Image (cartoon, rainbow, N blue to C red):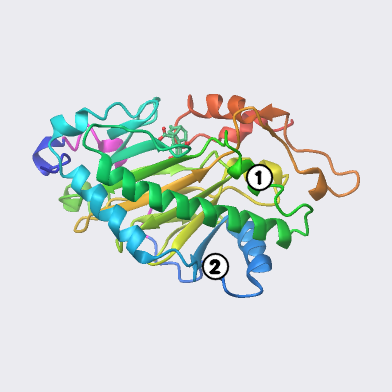
Amino acid sequence: MVVLSHPTLDFNQYSLLRSTCKPTASFAEIPEIDLSDPNAKSNIVKACEEFGFFKLVNHRVPIELMTKLEDESLCFFKLSESEKDKARPPHPLGYGCKNIGSSGDKGWIEYLLLNANPLPIFSQNSHTFLCAAEEYVTAVKKLSSQVVELIAEGLKMEPRNAISKLLNDEKADCCFRVNHYPPCPEPQALGGRNMIGFGEHTDPQIISVLRSNNSTGLQICLRDGAWVSVPPDAGAFFVNVGDALQVMTNGRFKSVKHKVLADPNRERVSMIYFGGPPLSEKIAPLPQLLEEGEESLYKEFTWWEYKTAAYKTKLADHRLGAFEKS
Ligand code: GA4
């Protein structure tokens, strides 16, 4: 049984979830980075500066790893509510439905939120899911590390593992989430507008690597404030700059605001790896990146301090605001 079936939802209760923005055209100019291209490093840097977001192709992660985990995830989400309830609550980690975070955000979504370092056992029958997740997370973790090393090279930073060593640390605070957005019925009831699946936000971590099935829904916010739809590509990954990387580059890269609208006809499944540093790590501009005389735009803080503060905020809040120097 799919949990978010139509009769169980009260549209009035979810009135705040209606998307208030005009429908946007698909954005064909999403930067596409070909990992086999010798210019990948400078292209990634350009994409992170302009969009905080890019699509990654020729990444060499076998599509079978992705589809296997997608199938396993769908098997989990098709379980009865009482079965899924055994993996609740999502806080700190586990199964969540409609509620995101702990500050009242809601979405047309159910999800699994898991520690990625290492993956936990979240229910008795999770063995096949966890095997698929383990394989997938191992591959995506490696890929994230490759991407931040290309970033370091593109920024002409020494050593090239200055960022990747944080993601590869045995205490790295990385998490993994699988989101399931069931088809959202009756958009007419919402005046033709789509229901919010996951409200607008930036990711607090260093980097996020997303893969979704072929459904639309993901939108990113451009520098001029316009929201654009990201055309889906089930064989590619989409990479976000997170708040921590914005700070580490002293604002040269911007963490990208993004959101997901539920599709009236198709279910969407996305799997996202969030690469974060160890909790005790100081998050500050990398000294190698500061020009002579350039000062940090941010107060000093550890990842633990930022994460603790971030988890008390609402999705759409400007989380870095409290850490900017006035
Ligand atoms: C956004 C990125 C990740 O999905 C996440 C989210 C977390 C959650 O779902 O519990 C948060 C959100 C995310 C940022 C602000 C807080 C915390 C929900 C929320 C309202 C797992 C993360 O690390 O931060």
Q: Residue at x 53, y 57 (%)?
A: 143
Report x, y in % for residue 13: 22, 31
Q: Determine the residue positioned at 90% across, 47% down.
A: 292
Task: Name the residue tied to disc 2.
Answer: 31
**Magenta segment main secondary structure:** loop
The amino acid pointed to by label 2 is Pro
In the foreground, 295 or 41: 41
Task: Let me know if residue 20 appears in the view.
Answer: no
Whole-percent x, y for residue 34 in the image: 55, 72
Q: Quadrant of residue 196?
A: top left
Label 2 beta carbon less than 8 Å to ligand 1: no
**Side of 27 relative to 282 (left or right):** left
Quadrant of the displayed image that contains ligand 1: top left
Q: Residue at x 21, y 27 (%)?
A: 86
Front of the two marks 1 and 2? 1
Q: Which residue is mark 1?
A: 165
165 lies left or right of 111 = right
Provide the residue span drawn in magenta: 10-23
